[in-house]
Image (cartoon, helix red, strand yellow):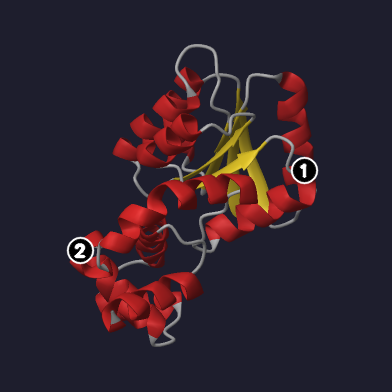
Amino acid sequence: MIGICIIEDLIDIQKGLQSIIESDRRFHLLKCFSNAEDAISELPLLKPDIVLTDINLPGKTGIECVSEIKAIVPEMLFIMFTIYEDNDQVFDALKAGSSGYILKNTSPEKIIEALVELHEGGSPMTPKIARKVLNTFNKNVNQQPVTDLLSKRELEVLDLLSKGFLYKEIADQLNISISTVKRHLNNIYSKLQVQNKIEAVNKLYNKNQG
């Protein structure tokens, strides 16, 4: 089961998210928080697979929470759940370490899809957010070869992925855990501004051919 925690100060929305998560047998809701401070204190002990967090919280923001937790538990995955879709908020969240960004008007079905996609190594974003990110970063990314954007280990992971290796096989080849493979893939998707492994592999080949 996929362990989930929620950080949301509006009780109605928190209960709505709780209902969505508890409706799917793949998820196990560990705890709900109403502020970032309590979450920062308890998340390293709870060790959820995914944290679904609002940005605008009383006290510390959701972005500050992501940044502080990622420094302690880098493998923990965060997805922002917010009304904000302006560029600054999006990019600040991604720079802090969030692996996904969805808006509060997202349907329950899409929320579930996003959580599963994130757990499987993707970086889910609502289409409008993804378009903003791509439009902003596309020019700079196109000017840099993939080999300059990724670390040596990330290139190794992407190379094995392009050869059809599964996550477990990549982990065995590189002598790392599956969760570390997924973390590298999340970083790859973020750096290359892609949404899935097919786009990442295509970008690798296109750059190499260019």
Q: Is residue 26 above or below residue 69?
A: below
Amino acid type for the residue under numbered disc 2: Asp
Nearer to us in this view, 178 or 202: 202
Amino acid type for the residue under numbered disc 1: Ile
Image coords of residue 174 (percent x, y): 26, 76
Nearer to us in this view, 1 or 67: 67
Nearer to us in this view, 180 or 111: 111
Task: State the mark number for residue 148.
Answer: 2
Image coords of residue 12 (percent x, y): 78, 23
Q: Quadrant of the C terminus?
A: bottom left
Q: Is residue 80 left or right of residue 43?
A: right
Residue at the extreme bottom of the image, as rendered:
163
Task: State the mark number for residue 20.
Answer: 1
Q: Secondary structure at mark 2?
A: helix
Q: Is residue 79 left or right of residue 21?
A: left
Image coords of residue 60 (percent x, y): 45, 17
Q: Tell me which residue sits at (36%, 55%) in the image.
A: 139
Q: Nearer the viewer, mark 2 or mark 1?
A: 2
Task: State the mark number for residue 42.
Answer: none
Residue at the extreme top of the image, as rendered:
59
Q: Quadrant of the N terminus?
A: bottom right
Q: Tell me which residue sits at (44%, 36%) in the image.
A: 93
Q: CA distance from mark 2 to mark 1?
A: 41 Å
